[in-house]
Image: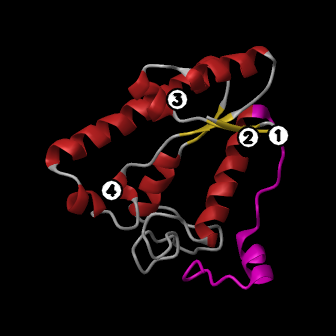
Amino acid sequence: MKSKRNLTMLDLVGDIVSKVPRGLALIASLSEGGKKGVVFTMPQFEHLGFANWGLAILNDSELIQYRDAVNISNKEVRRWAQEYDLAVVDLEALYKAIHRKEYVLQNGLLIDSSMRGNFFSSDGLYPTTLGQVIIANEVLKSINEKYGADVPLIDIPLYASKIGLNLKTGQ
């Protein structure tokens, strides 16, 4: 667990493996103090840009363990969010929609998870600048929906034009 000011990162998988729920204790203490929060689910590896990385690195048994760990973690994240009234950014659903070619920007641009697409960088793991902006908008949507906020979303085409971002490549 790393903390700086009011930003805290929790390692849910580490909590589950070690059976020491430090993350849950922190969430509970923040909730009792009336603070609000945002939690994130984790995507499955097959929804990453280089979807077959697991096949090159993990054996069948390890792949099953990985999927199970992600499923358990995401179930816990959703449970904690409900129990402690937290906003959830569902990266699992977002990455799945992008992987299935179901995520389209308001201007009609299809977000593409392939290796030559615009969501992932060339390593197939980390999002491009465009991918980061899409995730940022998902965070804003989650906060707006959960807490009744009215934070405007990032206008992606406008943002892209200001920083010289090519929406076709995400770079």
Q: Which residues are magenta?
A: 147-171
**First in residue order: circle 3 vs circle 4:** 4
Q: Farthest residue toward the left? A: 60
| Circle 4 or circle 2, nearest the eye | 4
* Mark 4 to mark 1 CA distance (whole Å): 33 Å
Residue hosting label 2: 143
Q: Amino acid under label 3?
A: Arg
| Circle 4 or circle 1, nearest the eye | 4
- Check residue 149 in the rendering and tell me which mark sits there, or answer none: 1
Q: Amino acid under label 2?
A: Ile
Taking 95 as reference, is 7 left or right? right
Question: What residue is drawn where x is 59% and y is 35%?
Answer: 10
In which quadrant of the rendered view does residue 5 lie? top right
Q: Characterize the local packing of mark 4: few (<14), some (14-19) or many (20 or more) Cα atoms within 10 angstroms.
A: some
Taking 57 as reference, is 132 left or right? right
Q: Amino acid under label 1?
A: Ala
Q: Do labels 3 and 4 touch, CB within 8 Å?
A: no
**154, 40: nearer the viewer:** 40
Q: Do labels 4 and 2 touch, CB within 8 Å?
A: no
Residue hosting label 3: 78
Q: Do labels 4 and 1 touch, CB within 8 Å?
A: no
* Mark 1 to mark 2 CA distance (whole Å): 7 Å
**First in residue order: circle 1 vs circle 3:** 3
In this view, 54 is above or below 14:
below
Residue 169 is one of the magenta-drawn residues: yes
Q: Residue 92's spot in the image, x, y percent?
A: 46, 47
Q: Secondary structure at mark 1?
A: loop
In this view, 15 is above or below 46:
above
Q: Residue 126's spot in the image, x, y percent?
A: 51, 64
Residue hosting label 4: 46
In this view, 2 is above or below 17:
below
Question: What residue is drawn where x is 67% and y is 64%?
Answer: 133
